[in-house]
Image (tube, grey):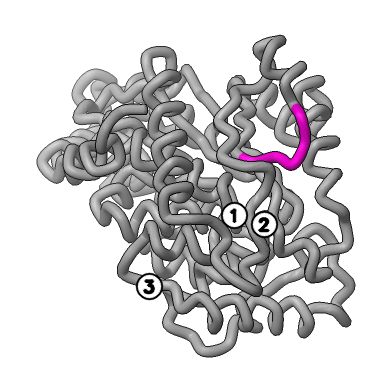
Amino acid sequence: MNDNLLEKTIAAIEPADAAVREEARHYIDTLTMPRRALGRLLDLAEELAAMTRTLRFPTARKEIVLMAGDHGIVRQGVCPQPSSVTTQMVRNFVHGGGGINVLARVAGAHVTVVDMGVDSDLSDLVDAGAVIDCKIAPGTADFSIGPAMSREQAVRSLEAGIRIAERLAPEVDVFATGEMGIGNTSPSSAVVTVLSGADDPAPFVGRGAGLDPAKLAHKAAVIRRGIACNSPDPADGIDLLAKVGGFEIGGIAGVVLGAARMRKPVVIDGFISSAGALVAAVLAPASRDYMILGHGSAEPGHVAMARLLGKQPLLDLGMRLGEGTGAALALQLLDAARAIMTEMATFESANVTEEGLK
């Protein structure tokens, strides 16, 4: 393990380049269309230019990092599925049968599956090179009665994500986040509740993987109890992660931090991925500059997450699958933004009269 990897990574993250953003804006104004006629696609192009420090930003090599882990909070009856489904779905991903596999193929993206804390033996998949082993422990503790993990485990999960980003970076233009972990909407709801300064998690608690609406009040009560007994510090991302988070949430936060340090865009998926992004933002506010919020999750707490991140989702399709599926769809918009910047004619090159289109 690299000494002080987390601290060194945070210290090395620089804001996106405002001068390059302005250069991109001026260049876009020379393209053969009415001013800002492609709306938010042009905003995206400017953001990508500022992140990468070039108007000809690359997007072809896309990597979806899917972090997997289990959660002790499941023992409190906050979700309808048992933790064993996490393992079953990881094996489904490895065989290419998950929703994320299908949509990644559409986007031309590769999926890397990482075991951050699955409560089963995945050594056969690790030995086959199908899963990367970063297991911190076989699932977190039940945060409704104590911390989800130790502070040392929280740092290990963050640094694991950073190392994954560093390992993959030479062959990656754009990162995206995904996850799998039965019960992980509960820690995600806890994270957004704490960072929102709210007394009641109920407005941020949703059905997750299909919870009966009648049991939502119980889920909210369990999360409320967990926040009360742990008193996580909203100004300390490590404390927040340790007390009410998850290993895969820490891994996602680490990927975001690693991508930001290397000036690579990272497309954030939905509710759980946004919890990881929020942890990263607490630790390194400048990392927000490298985040692109792929879609708006149907989970009720995601609106507050987007507000805390200062982001507007690229897509809003009423999705709540997770896995990185919303991010996979959004990746195609990054390709479109690059194409506009590299293939569209300027008024001068096309000999088009500029005044008539402004």
Q: Which residues are magenta?
A: 117-121
Asked whether, in this view, residue 214 is left or right of residue 52, the answer is right
| Vertical order, 140 against 299 (above or below) | above
Which amino acid, by three-letter code, is at mark 3? Asp
Q: Secondary structure at mark 3?
A: loop
**Residue 268 seen by the camera:** yes
Residue behind mark 1: 272
Q: Splitting the image into 4 quarters, where does residue 68 fall?
A: top right
Q: Quadrant of the N terminus?
A: top left
Question: How many C-alpha atoms fall within 10 Å of the one at disc 3: few (<14), some, or many (≥20)?
Answer: some
Q: Are marks 2 and 1 in contact (CB under 8 Å)?
A: yes
Lower position in the chain sequence, tag 3 or tag 2: 2
**What residue is drawn where x is 87% and y is 53%?**
82
Q: Splitting the image into 4 quarters, where does residue 117 fall?
A: top right
Which amino acid, by three-letter code, is at mark 2? Asn
Give the mark count: 3
**Residue 324 seen by the camera:** no
| Vertical order, 32 against 110 (above or below) | below
| Vertical order, 91 against 83 (above or below) | above
- Disc 2 vs disc 1: which is toward the camera? 2
Residue behind mark 3: 233
Q: CA distance from mark 3 to mark 2?
A: 20 Å
Asked whether, in this view, residue 315 is left or right of residue 287, the answer is right
Q: Which mark is residue 184?
A: 2
